[in-house]
Each structure stands twice: as structure tokens, then as C-alpha cells.
Amino acid sequence: MAQVGGKGPWLSRMLREWTITFCTNHKDLPTTKYGKSNVSILEDEDLAADIHLHLQSLGKWISANDIVRYVATPEFQARLKTKKQISVRTAQRWMKRMDYRWKAEPKGQYSDGHEREDVVDYRQNKFLPKWRALENMTRWWKPDGSEDGDVRERVFAARPDGKVVVIWRHDESIFYAHDRRKLRWVHASETAKPIVKGEGASLMVGHFVSPDYGWLRAKNLNLKSAQTLFRPGKNRDGYQTTEDILQQATVAMDILDADYSDEKHVFAYDNATIHTARPANALSARYMQVKPNKDFLCKVKGSGGESDTFVKMKDGSFKDGTPQKLDYRQNHKKYPGHFKGMQVLIEERRKKGHNLPDPSKLKAQCKGFRCPKGRTDCCCRRVLYCEPDFVNQKSRLEEHCEARGYQVIFFPKYHCELNFIEQCWGYAKRIYRMFPLSSSEEDLEKNLIASLDAVPLVSMRRFATRSSRFGDSYFHGLNGAQAAWANKKYRGHRTIPPDFKAEMDAAFAKNNRS
């Protein structure tokens, strides 16, 4: 019998044992364990994200044992509704599925700039103060998606007009035609089947989202949306430019002016170059000459095959607010209409009360413009580079939006956790991968739009609360690993509690001992 079933001696022995037992007791029958559902914990994206955040909070020296210990904690066991633990081998398989690999640490160009000095300085001293001031005038959300707190009371305390602030997060993401689920249970009898090659056609989507309203669109849904679709590539729509970003911002402002004018709206972009690009004539010391020069002009790149043009740089301003002309007058005897040069510009500022060094004793610039750390008076270029009007030169996007009364704020580099639209993309792509595979660009667009529309508003509000929790963690001085720990520990809260530090220190000390 065992041989007929393709089995060996073990089944033969068990058949004899079961037969003898059955002759003694006709009710004593062997039971099968087949048919039980054994789905990996990692199929639950919330649990998988929790494990990933836990590993991130431990720093870079992590191991499979860290997952074993974490799964064994009472809190995690309660979420699983089981007391079963996992083996080290299982934890190793999980790490592989979560894209961890045992290899040499990436260095140099592959390193993350999350805690880079200039990035941290921007995050702590520029971004977070602005963000927290704005967030105090926005709506807050409970885990069930309902509004948390009296927004009107908070807003009237900060704004005389009492208008609620709505922050619209912006981002782009690319969807691929052949992006589908690849992990599933495969029967041993299945053979390899021909598959489509490559990722297929790509489609970039750019959009705005807020926890108040979801995706930015007109209240009459058939009229207008701030969504843009772009086919990136050399032989397709090309590559996105600042002009494209400005056009999308214009559409967004038109919608908000028409349908949401009773609120104050702010746009939040990432720190990509096409977002932060300055006007061609923007005030900049980077290429200024130290002496007067008649040929100092700013190049404006031509678009659509047009040739480049050249314009004069915009004027600076003294600390009292009066303008500082960068060029001599046309009737100047020696330098008619010439650029004055950095030395003259600095000397004029000194006469206006600026506390600057004598430019005649400074070189034009340090070698390669690599000035000594912390110095702002080492060369003429660095002196002007650090002047307030040069530092505070606004981007084209800021000038474009502020002209219509809209504020723009930029997220710190490498901080996608602060922009909850990233989680909206992830949610939409999970839905997109469930559609039938198709190489058609028409299906790609249709399925992409359907996937975005399927992201629930309540999920968006939870994502926004999570991002706020990260921001609050950074505001309290936590680094990336510590913020990840706090976000996991105090999930469901918009901010971390005042007494978090003692608990965090104890948790990190425990991890270091183990």
C-alpha cells in the first residue's frame, strides 16, 4: 500500500499500527493535519512594518535573534493571539524576505544621508519650527479617522482670521506595467511558464494629498484634478522639469481658489532639484568675479529648441531693506553698466552697517570653494554667500505660489517618513499588483488611477498621524533609529509623551545587553 502511494517504510509501519489500533477500537481513527492555513506573519503588512521598524530602531548591528526576541515579547504575542515562538532559521528567512542580505556594509556613494550634518541642521532649525507652527493650525485625527480636538480654538489663538490650515503633501511615483505579486505557494508539479520580459511600460503620477480631503481634486469630481500623468523616457514624454511642476501647482491653486477658499493652504514638496530650482537671475555669489566685469550675466536655457539667452542678475538688498544695485550706472566714467565685483559689493555693505571684513584683504575664494569649516569671513565669495539676501533667495516654485498667496515648504532630504504620501503610494501599488497582468499602456493608466482612488481616507489620516509622530520625535532631539523606536512604541498617538526618554534609554540599554 505504501509503495502504491509512492511512500516508503515509515508509512508501511504506520499503516500496520493504525490497522491494529482500529481493530481494537473502531472509533480510534488517525486524523489529518492537512488543510490548516499556514500563512507567513509577513503577509500582514502592518506586522511586517512593525518588525522592520523594530530592526531599524536597533541600529545597524542587527541579527535574526533580534526578531526572535521581538516576536516573543508579550505585546507582539498579544497581537498574534498566540504564544507560539519562532526559530532563528525562520527569522533568517524573514530577514531575506524583507530584503536584508548578509554582506559587506555599503560605503561612500551608497550611504544614507539621513543624519548628515547639513540635513540635520535643516531639519531641526528650519523645517521643524515651520512645520510645527503650521501643524498647530491643522486638524488632528483619531485612529478611527474622526477629528481629534477643537481645531477652531487652536486656530483662533494663532490666526486672527481663524482659517484652518490644510497642508497638501506632493510627490511623484512610477508604476510599471509588469509589476505584480511574485510570492505565492507554488505546487511541486508546476513547471516554468514563459513570462513577459522586463518591467514593461512605465507611468509617472504626480499628486497632492491631505488628511483632510485625500487626493486634491475639484468638489465636482468630473471637472478637474491636480493629478498629473507623465510617460518618462527619452523617446516618450522626456523628463519632468520645473516648468511641469509649476503648471501642476497652477492647476492645484485654481482648484483650491474655486472650491476650498475658506481655508489656508500650504504645499509641502520634497527637496528635489526640480522643486528647489531658483530663477535664472537669482541672487548668487557662486560665479561672481572679484573685480568689475562687463560680461557678468546669467544664462537662461532655451526650451523647445530655442537658443539660450542671457540676463542680468537681480539686485541684492542691504540689511535696512533698501536695494543694492549689482551694476554701475550707464553713465559711470570708468565702468559704464559693468558688474561691480564682489569687493565693491562687500565694501558698500560695510558702509551700510554690515559687520563684514575688509574685502581688500580677502582672496576671491578659497581653493575649490572648500572653505574652513565654520568660517564665513575667509574669502569674498563666502562672505556674500552667507549674507541674508543671498541665503534667503527663494525658488521659482516658492515665488510662483506665493504670488497667489500660497506658502511652500520643503521636506528635509532623505526623510520620506515625514511625507505620508509615500505610504499612500505603497497602499496603491499593493492594490495595483492585484490587477490582471497586461502590457497595455491603456490598462496601466486605468489600473493606476483605480488603485489611487481605492486608498481609503481613514488610512490616509492614520498615515498622517504616523508622520506627525516622526516629526515630533525629531523635534525632541531623537535620531533616525530612536525616532523609529518611538514611532513603534507610541503608535496611535500624534506625539510622543513627555516621559519617553527614560523608557527609551531602558529599551536601548536592554537591546545593547542582549
Image (cartoon, rainbow, N blue to C red):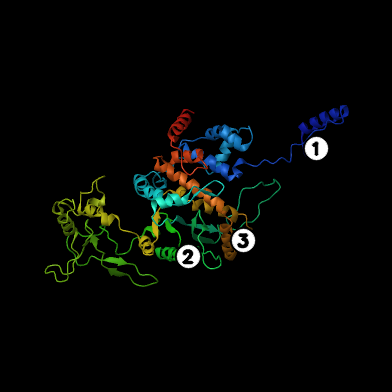
Q: Which mark is residue 438?
A: 3
378 on left or right of 306:
left
Q: CA distance from mark 2 to mark 1?
A: 74 Å
Task: Using the rendered image of the protein, determine whether residue 101 is visible from the camera's viewpoint.
Answer: no
- What amino acid is labelled 2 in the image? Ile
* Furthest residue toward bottom: 306
User: Residue 442 lies in what quarter of the image?
Assistant: bottom right
- Residue at image position (68%, 50%) is 191
- What amino acid is labelled 3 in the image? Ser
- Residue at image position (44%, 50%) is 153
- Residue at image position (43%, 37%) is 498
Q: Around disc 3, counting alpha carbons within 10 Å, would you say few (fewer than 14), some (14 to 19), or many (20 or more)?
A: some
* Total numbered circles: 3
282 or 420: nearer the eye? Answer: 420
Q: Which mark is residue 3?
A: 1
Q: Which mark is residue 255?
A: 2
235 on left or right of 157:
right
User: Where is residue 263 shown, x and y percent of the image?
Assistant: 45, 59
Task: Using the rendered image of the protein, determine whether residue 403 is visible from the camera's viewpoint.
Answer: yes
Q: Secondary structure at mark 1?
A: loop
Q: Which mark is residue 353?
A: none
292 on left or right of 144:
left
Q: CA distance from mark 1 to mark 3?
A: 45 Å
18 on left or right of 451:
right
User: Where is residue 443 shown, x and y percent of the image?
Assistant: 60, 63
Q: Secondary structure at mark 3?
A: loop
User: Where is residue 466 shown, x and y percent of the image?
Assistant: 49, 46
Point out the tag, 1 or 3, that comes first from the N-terminus. 1
